[in-house]
Image (cartoon, grey):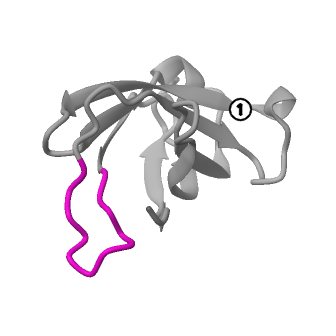
């Protein structure tokens, strides 16, 4: 499995909900993977090399459709209310013996006139 590098943009104070489809990018077909029983971790940091002590926020993973490889990540509005600017995120499969980065990229939060 290769990780997908992509970016997302949200507004300050907004609930961020991101749907990922896990695919076998190592194959030509990029077949959807069955993620039944998988466990996930979603972290947001300023830079990839920052330690977990420097976490800005985390997301909660919910498997939407395991056979279709669909996992939804939710980052609360309380977390995004304290953020403005560009961050880095990573989505990992965390199962012992199968840990792998599924996606990583920019998580940008723009300011808004709405009070967060």
Q: Residue tagged by mark 1?
A: 56
Q: Which residue is located at x 44 percent, y 27 percent?
A: 39
Q: Which residue is located at x 49 percent, y 62 percent?
A: 3
Region of the chain picked out in magenta, as a range: 22-33
Q: Is residue 48 shown left or right of residue 53? A: left
Residue 1 x, y percent position in the rendering:
44, 62
Residue situated in front as seen by the camera: 34 or 111:
34
Q: Which residue is located at x 28 percent, y 38 percent?
A: 35
Q: Which residue is located at x 45 percent, y 53 percent?
A: 9
Q: Main secondary structure of the magenta part?
A: loop
Q: Which residue appears farthest toward the top when viewing the image? A: 78
Residue 111 x, y percent position in the rendering:
56, 44
Q: Is residue 101 above or below residue 116?
A: below
Q: Is residue 34 shown left or right of residue 90? A: left
Residue situated in front as seen by the camera: 24 or 81:
24
Q: Secondary structure at mark 1?
A: loop
Q: Is residue 87 shown left or right of residue 90? A: right
Is any atom of residue 111 visible in this view?
A: no
Q: Is residue 27 above or below residue 85?
A: below
């Amino acid at each position: 499995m290769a990780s997908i590098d992509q970016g997302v943009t949200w507004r300050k104070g907004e609930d961020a909900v991101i749907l990922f489809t896990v695919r076998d990018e190592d194959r030509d077909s990029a077949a959807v993977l069955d993620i039944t029983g998988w466990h996930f971790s979603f972290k947001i940091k300023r830079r990839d090399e920052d330690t977990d002590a420097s976490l800005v926020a985390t997301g909660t993973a919910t498997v939407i459709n395991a056979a279709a490889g669909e996992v939804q990540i939710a980052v609360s509005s309380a977390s995004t209310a304290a953020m403005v600017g560009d961050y880095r995120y990573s989505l990992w499969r965390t199962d012992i013996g199968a840990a792998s980065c599924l996606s990583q990229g920019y998580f940008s939060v723009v300011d808004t006139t709405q009070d967060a």
